[in-house]
Amino acid sequence: MRFEQTPRPDQTLRVSARLVTSSTILHLSADELERTINQEQTENPALEVTEQRICLFCSTPLYGQKCTVCGRFAQPEQQGQEDTTHYDDSQWRQQQVFYDIDNYSFTEADHDDDFDPLAQLPSGETLAEELLQQLETLISPDDAPIAEQLVGNLNGRGYLDISIMEIAAHLHVTSERVEYVLSQLQTLEPLGIGARNLRECLLIQLQALSEQNQTHPLAFILIDRYLEHLGHNQFQEIARQIKVTEQEVRQGYLYIRSTLHPHPAYIYRSATQDMHGGCDAAYIRPDVIIRKGENGFEVELMEEKRYQIRVGTNYHDPVRPTEPVNNDIQRYMYPHKVRAKFFVDCINRRWRTLRRVAELVVEFQHAFLERGVRYLLPLTRAEVAERLQLDEGTVSRATANKYALLPNGRLIPIADFFDGSLRIKDMLRELIQAEIPTRRLSDEELARHLATLGFPLARRTVTKYREEMGLGSSRERG
């Protein structure tokens, strides 16, 4: 992927394979990173990886097959090297001057590489990578930062979690330019990606289907005007308002349910799993462990404790060779060692960025860690990015697909630290659990109860939260 930009005449800026690989490594989950490290170690003789035997859930050193702290069994031990020498990367860090050491922005000085680091990643691209590559053919190079912000702010369902005005203000561009790039994003597969709500997601899919074949005649009006009624199975009321039979409304409803998908990102995940023949099921394990220490909460990175990754020292430094490269071994090892140095740098920057983000979030959400979800404070990735002087897309990638183990032993997605709705959902769940079985509360009544607790919400917002929690309506709970 290559975006051309010309901010000043004397320098050509672009996105190189190195920078994309660096951003991708930051975005990887723990399982994906493990496969990436194993693959790179296999293919690159200049890379040395030492893996410590630790419990992959609580990071306790393992001396047998079962963790003495949490009781979990160890995964089969991998064959690794026994060298435990600590590697100091300061010897070659000075050569990495082509981009910001902590940021993954779409700006890098022009630099040609002798190899393609993208080839070292696990087979298959992430959804974000694929979307950016498709957008490259649809928009001008000047709109590349807008594309990155849009794709970087897609949530796990594929919806856009930030407003057009926020992106425009952040990048100092017009909202019309952002709207245009978003309109191009919404033409890509999976259909519905980049929608801002369920209605827009379904309408995008319906519009695409209508261009290929005939759709149900009631589908558009049901989604556009009566989506909430459909959610409450109010078929008779819909039929009365649009003057058709209830049977026709039910048929339109079934068409929508069977043809359209409310969460486009899930389609991509399913397709990716099918493409790779179904990966072995892997349990979720933490990337960050939060412990209660004498001086407050402490952050520990599981990967940093598990791996020691370094460039082999059995050959001359290709940047400052002590003698001319005059034999076949030196010529063979030169590109491998350059690649290994870049790979180690990517891993170190992943750890450094993740630690900085985690420490700031833990400090900010101290009350939540001490007292529970009711004390979760409003926090956005944009605020974290501003405090750490990072790009917002960097923070989004650092927190995506990552999990934190709390001091109370609970494992949560790091994204939960940014979900201000969690404390409201906790109150909502409590109100529903306290209901009298013969007198279930409607969403309107639940909204009034929450307002008395200091959380004024519209009824439709209560409905949205209730459905996200997997709880039925008052009629369904009755």
Image: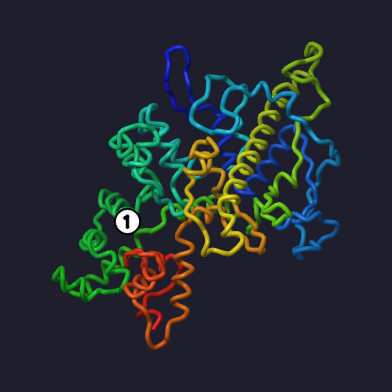
Q: Which residue is situated farthest in the left direction here?
A: 243
Three-letter residue code for mark 1: Leu
Residue hosting label 1? 202
Q: Residue 427: x percent and y percent?
A: 46, 70
- Horizontal arrangement in the rendering, residue 192 relative to residue 117 (left or right): left
**Where is residue 298 drawn, in percent x and y?**
69, 51
The percent position of residue 420, horizontal first and vertical second, equals 46, 57
Q: Residue at x 36, y 51 (%)?
A: 192
Q: Quadrant of the C terminus?
A: bottom left
Residue 138 in sight: yes
> Which image quadrant for residue 188?
top left
Dot 1 falls on a residue whose secondary structure is helix
The residue that appears at 82% across and 60% down in the rendered structure is 65
Observer-nearest residue: 129 or 448? Answer: 448
Q: Quadrant of residue 228?
A: bottom left
Q: Is residue 149 left or right of residue 330?
A: left
Tell which of 211 and 31 is nearer to you. 31
Q: Using the image, determine if residue 85 lies above or below residue 478.
A: above
Whether residue 287 is situated above or below residue 83 in the rendered picture: below
State the image coordinates of residue 1 (x, y, percent, origin top left): 48, 31
**Residue 282 visible somewhere in the drawing:** no
The residue shown at (53%, 50%) is 275
